[in-house]
Image (spheres, rainbow, N blue to C red):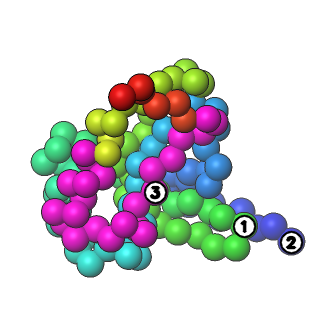
Amino acid sequence: MHTTIRTNVRQLAWRPSPGEHYLSVNVALVPDLIKLWEFGHSLGLQPELTVIQYHDRVEVHLLLLHEQLEPGTVLGFEWNALIERLLEVDVPDEAIRHTYGGQMAREAA
């Protein structure tokens, strides 16, 4: 049996569509959500609470980045710096979800 949860909170697919790129943080693993929310705003982001429904669980995430790129877009490493900055607000590595639908190409060094 498969159940779909309906809420007024945006739902993200656990497997993004081709070209869909997002960075989110599992709020259950964050010690201070308000600090993270304010941190996101200080970086010029628009944080948004979302849910990701997996086959066996539902997770609540703070979505920091969500964009639709052309499939096969080459992503630079600018997002690595943002991910590293999350350490400033005590976000553990296992709380961070950085994903891209399809094959993520990287810039040549």
> Considering only order in the chain, which callout, 3 or 1, is on the residue closer to the N terminus?
1
Q: Quadrant of residue 81?
A: top left
Q: Residues within 10 Å of mark 2 (few under 14, many from 20)?
A: few
The amino acid type of the residue labelled 3 equals Arg
Could you tell whether 83 is left or right of 3 in the image?
A: left
Q: Position of residue 73 (x, y in %)?
A: 51, 23
Circle 1 packing at 10 Å, graded few (<14), some (14-19), many (20+), is: few
Residue type beneath disc 1: His
Residue 63, x across and y down, in percent? 39, 52
Camera sees residue 96: yes
Where are the magenta residues, as a range? 81-103
Question: Which one is closest to the eye, mark 1 or mark 3?
Answer: 3
Element at badge 3? strand
In the rendered image, the quadrant that contains the C terminus is top left
Direction from residue 19 to residue 93 in the image, left or right: left
Residue at 29%, 36% in the rendered image: 78
Q: Residue at x 33, y 71 (%)?
A: 92
